[in-house]
Image (tube, rainbow, N blue to C red):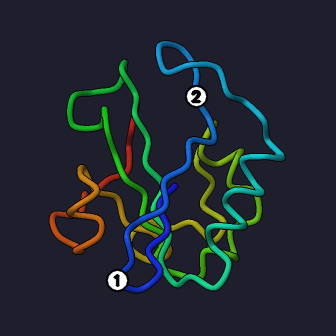
Amino acid sequence: MFKYPGSHAPKKQVVYARGSYGSIDNKAAFNQAYTDASYGSETLIVGRACANCEAAYRQVFYKRIRDPASFSDPYTSFTGAMTATNNVLNVDYEFYGTLADAVKGNNKYASSKAT
């Protein structure tokens, strides 16, 4: 997860990994890290790497654009099927192919299909 407090450098934290990326799977720690990162923030970016996804979605960045704290169970949404409750593309979040684009708001994806 990446938190951008103003113009400061991002804070990066790995909160879930499996397969060739390692073995980290702790729902409570994931949700706590999300809550901590979203506290007092209008923008929160979550990066995802997926070695088996389509080429355009192997590395993606989910940018929360509407109240990051309103997302009730981020672990389930990010590690399973994305839910539509408070999580609508280009209303609640935007999807990008690079961290730089997510930060600047350039080249957002029209779809968040990442499988």
* Left or right of residue 90: residue 36: right
Please give the residue where the numbered disc 1 appears in the rendered image.
7
Outermost residue toward the left in this view? 107
Tell which circle, 2 or 1, labels the residue nearer the N-terminal end.
Answer: 1
Which residue is depicted at the point 39% across and 38% down?
114
In this rendering, is residue 22 above or below 99? above
Which residue is depicted at the point 39% across and 77% down?
8
* Left or right of residue 6: residue 70: right
Image disc number at residue 23:
none
In this rendering, is residue 55 above or below 88? above
Q: CA distance from mark 2 to mark 1?
A: 28 Å
SS at mark 1 in the image: loop
Which residue is depicted at the point 34% across and 58% down?
95
SS at mark 2 in the image: strand
In this rendering, is residue 22 above or below 56? above
* Left or right of residue 1: residue 36: right
Which residue is depicted at the point 25% across and 57% down?
109
Q: Quadrant of residue 25?
A: top right
**Which callout, 2 or 1, points to the residue nearer the camera?**
1
At label 1, the amino acid type is Ser
* Left or right of residue 108: residue 80: right
x then y, percent, for residue 56: 21, 37
At label 2, the amino acid type is Ala
Image disc number at residue 17:
2
Outermost residue toward the right in this view? 28
